[in-house]
Image (cartoon, rainbow, N blue to C red):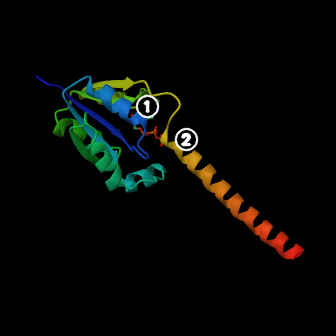
């Protein structure tokens, strides 16, 4: 019988680390279910996303190895989802190592190694730095404008 895999995540600013974990997770079974954190749930977690839920969902739904996408609204839903979809293996990146060991009563639990050197947080900080330099540019234009007036 084919195995069903379940994983969760926010998948903001979808990047290669996201693709790799989904592809690696799929290697352990035949059906891959991905829970995507809603914008409201992210707020609860103190996480601010750039890409809205509907778009994050649409992107993940269109990844070849993904079979079903569901909403993640709460910390508590995992056991219900495992039962509802008859999940065999629950998989997360090893940034969550041991965090979900309580689910071992319901299915196998695996933590896969993360792709080094990339995360949504890191991409967001790059975007922030770009917007800071945009501000600096505007300030520079202001100074230039004043200088032009002084010398006119
Ligand atoms: N992931 C991964 N390798 C990365 C980044 C993420 O394997 N470099 C995995 C996580 O371990 C998780 C899934 O991708 O199982 C979704 O993670 P998510 O938290 O949405 O992505 P991050 O880039 O880690 O986001 P953040 O920086 O906001 O934590």
- Rendered residue at 30%/43% (across/down): 60
Question: How far from the left and from the top, in percent, is residue 53?
Answer: 35, 54
Q: Is residue 82 above or below residue 58?
A: above
Q: Is mark 2 on a helix, strand or loop?
A: helix
- Few, some or many residues within 10 Å of mark 1 (<14, 14–19, 20+): few
Structural distance between the alpha carbons of marks 1 and 2: 18 Å
Dividing the image into four equal quarters, which quarter contains ligand 1?
A: top left
Where is the C terminus found, in terms of image quarters?
bottom right
Identify which residue, 6 or 150, lies in the foreground: 150
Viewer-side label of 1, 2: 2
Res. 120 in view = yes
Identify which residue, 71 or 55, lies in the foreground: 55
* Residue 96's disc number: 1
In this view, the residue farthest toward the left is: 1
Identify which residue, 38 or 97, lies in the foreground: 38
Where is the N terminus found, in terms of image quarters?
top left
Q: Does the residue labelled 2 lie within 8 Å of ligand 1?
A: yes
Question: How far from the left and from the top, in percent, is residue 115?
Answer: 46, 28
Q: Does the residue labelled 1 lie within 8 Å of ligand 1?
A: yes
- Rendered residue at 32%/25% (across/down): 24
- Rendered residue at 69%/64% (across/down): 138
Q: In the rendered structure, which disc, 1 or 2, sits on the residue that comes first in sequence? A: 1
* Image quadrant assignment for residue 15: top left
**In the image, is 67 to the left or to the right of 145?**
left
Q: Is mark 1 on a helix, strand or loop?
A: helix
Question: How far from the left and from the top, in percent, is residue 148?
Answer: 83, 72
- Rendered residue at 43%/24% (across/down): 113
* Residue 15's disc number: none
In this figure, which residue is indicated by the disc labeled 2?
122
């Amino acid at each position: 019988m084919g195995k069903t895999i379940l994983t969760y995540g926010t998948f903001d600013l979808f990047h290669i680390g996201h693709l790799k974990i989904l592809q690696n997770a799929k290697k352990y079974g035949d059906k891959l279910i991905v829970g995507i954190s809603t914008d409201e749930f992210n707020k609860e977690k103190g996480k601010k996303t750039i890409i809205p839920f509907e778009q994050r969902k649409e992107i993940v739904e269109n990844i070849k190895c993904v079979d079903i996408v569901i909403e993640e609204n709460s910390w508590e839903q995992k056991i219900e989802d495992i039962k509802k979809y008859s999940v065999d293996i629950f998989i997360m990146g090893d940034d969550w190592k041991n965090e979900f060991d309580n689910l071992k009563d319901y299915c196998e639990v695996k933590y896969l190694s993360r792709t080094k050197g990339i995360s949504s947080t890191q991409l967001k900080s790059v975007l922030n730095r770009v917007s800071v330099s945009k501000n600096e540019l505007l300030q520079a234009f202001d100074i230039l404008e004043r200088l032009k007036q002084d010398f006119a």
